[in-house]
Image (tube, grey):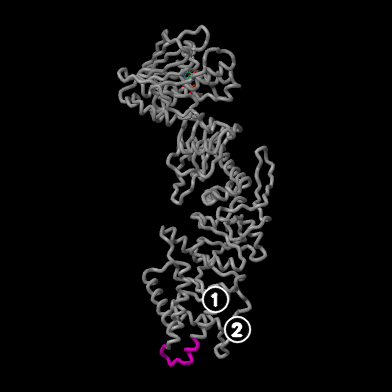
Amino acid sequence: MTTILEQGNISIHTENIFPIIKKALYSEHEIFLRELVSNAVDAIKKLSMVARSGEYSGDISAPEIEIKFDKDKKTLSISDTGIGMTAEEIKKYINQVAFSSAEEFITKYKDSAAEDPIIGHFGLGFYSSFMVASTVEIDTFSYKEGSEAVHWSCDGSTQFELSASDRTTVGTTITLTLMEGEEEYLEPARIRQLIKTYCDFMPVPIKIDGEVVNKHEAPWKQSPSSLTDEDYLEFYRYLYPFQEDPLLWIHLNTDYPFVVNGILYFPKLKPDIDITKSSIKLYCNQVFVTDNCEEVVPRFLLPLRGVIDSTDIPLNVSRSFLQGDRTVRRIADYIAKKVGDSLKALYRDDPAKYIASWQDLGNFVKFGSLNDDKFKEQVKDILIFRTTAKLGDTEAAKVEVQTDEGDAWSEVSDNKPATDAKGNFYTTLQEYLERNKDKHENRVFYATDEVSQATYIELFRSQGLELLFMDSFIDTHFIPTLEREYSDVKFVRVDADLDDTLLDKEKQSEIVDPATNKTRDDQIKEMFEQAINRPRVNVKPQALKGEGAPPAMVLLPEEARRMQETMAMIQQQEMQFPDDHVLMVNTAHPLIQNLLGLSQSTIIGADGGSSPAGDMATMICNQIYDTALMAQKGFDANGMKTFVERSNTLLTKLTER
Ligand SMILES: Nc1ncnc2c1ncn2[C@@H]1O[C@H](COP(=O)(O)OP(=O)(O)OP(=O)(O)O)[C@@H](O)[C@H]1O
């Protein structure tokens, strides 16, 4: 058994702890203003609660806070029309550090307090004024009947003085005599700027030199039904002046299991966006806390903008505390889920708007999916791609949406697939795979550039094959994620390889030269190989279906191209066009058939040297190759010169005949 030698109370010497509270509790001096104005707002709220309960019958119609300066006396004063304090209350709440009235007050007036929460909690904020003031005075007159106005003063030591005051109006004035070095707080412009930062949305008008300087209405605290689109946009423009309007917004509104209000806006995402920086502003009860929201907002939501307000996020806490805090993590999860739900609801209720914003919204949804598995799961049904298919009425947008009431999932389907402004249709990957499973099961054909891949796209389209456009800057990174998700599915770029459905099997090559066992395809391959004379180009004769199919196409096999893209990304360079590529020669095209005839006619007449027809065939092979290359990449100066010269020579020769 342990023998207890002594038991007792730990004693704290106020003289020692006081400087610590004054200096170390707050990182920045300017915070004092936020604290004093918060106290003033609390006092005003308290008076109106008391009035509502019938305990006060005086006038509460013009609540306000007024800030005044006296440069000669070096004083700054903050007056409020709040509840005031009696001498007893000063002794209790001010003289006893870390003794807040909030708890007592909230217990007593709990119905009103739930509607309009009090900011202060700790009973420390007032003392932050000693960071900048050598003397702090309180002049206060309580609403309580029979009370007398009192004056309190303290010079920063643990001594105070309490005396009678000649104040006649209910409320409180706090007067700070500023210390040397803190004169900046005598400048109205500086105080105005601090009020704008910290107190702009506090619910009471704050006057400096007779003029109200804060906005004093917080749209995020209003009910969404009372706000118009224009109100939301106006608020966005107020928060982020000179920025492009946002695509859409979400109004957060929850009381349980924690209080979170806010408005989050989706801006247009630019490729050069800094995804590690947040510009969401964090508030606690309409008091600005920080615009570094990295801990409260999931990383992938950082590109969003707007305001989050939560009483459950403590005001005076450090970064590391926020990171480890369970409530903060749950708030972050809640926000992510809410964002996902809102996007689903938009897709369900207004697919046209969803599609119209998709160009930008899509980047965001993909970015979120890349970064957060839960979010990926949530948005997988609303991840859409522009398709070359013309979708009929039955191919409706389907999405499951969680109802607000609970966990019931309802499947909603609308019969008219929406299009974008240009009449393009959009589809989910699931729908694409389902629609095309008979033609090409588990293969997704995609294009990344409508202009440069036009020939390829046209070939697919003419054969009734459906292509998806994956042409945003994030898609290159996103395709591998999709492949992991749909492990049986292969993604093939339109210029990677020709699908069997595009080939005319009946025109497959038969043996034409019994002596050498060569097929016609072999002859075509040889002819091109000799003519273009590029060992790294793989000439591949194939018969394409369809009259519109081109005589030749340059193909970049999927795997090799992706390797090249990754290399380019690592080296932060643009992708070089690979020397190793495929030249697909369409043996079904009349030009190729004629060309083979032309080159063979030269063999007969040839005596070892070059013949005019042979030269012509070589020239045409090169022209065909260059034209095919042109669909993939531009020429360099030399290539362009050769191409133009050869074109002119060919035309000249043609007209000579
Ligand atoms: N302007 C004021 N009018 C009336 N009472 C006030 C005023 N300023 C302070 N008080 C009283 O003094 C108490 C202590 O204030 P203080 O700022 O130190 O702490 P708090 O506001 O309760 O909590 P926090 O530390 O979170 O700010 C308050 O709870 C309130 O009762």
Magenta stretch bounds: 599-610
Return the x and y of residue 371 as percentages of the image width and height: 53, 49
Indicate left or right for 570 with 117 as reference: left
Q: Give me the residue at 52% from left, 14% from top.
A: 59
Residue 13 appears in the figure: no
Residue on which disc 2 sits: 510
Residue 586 badge: 1
Q: Toward the viewer: 382 or 95? A: 382
Q: Is residue 134 above or below residue 295?
A: above
Return the x and y of residue 526 as percentages of the image width and height: 49, 82
Q: Secondary structure at mark 2?
A: loop
Q: Is residue 188 above or below residue 490?
A: above
Looking at numbered disc 2 in the image, what kind of residue is underneath it? Glu
Quadrant, the N terminus: top right
Q: Give me the residue at 56% from left, 91% from top.
A: 515
Indicate left or right for 12 with 397 as reference: left
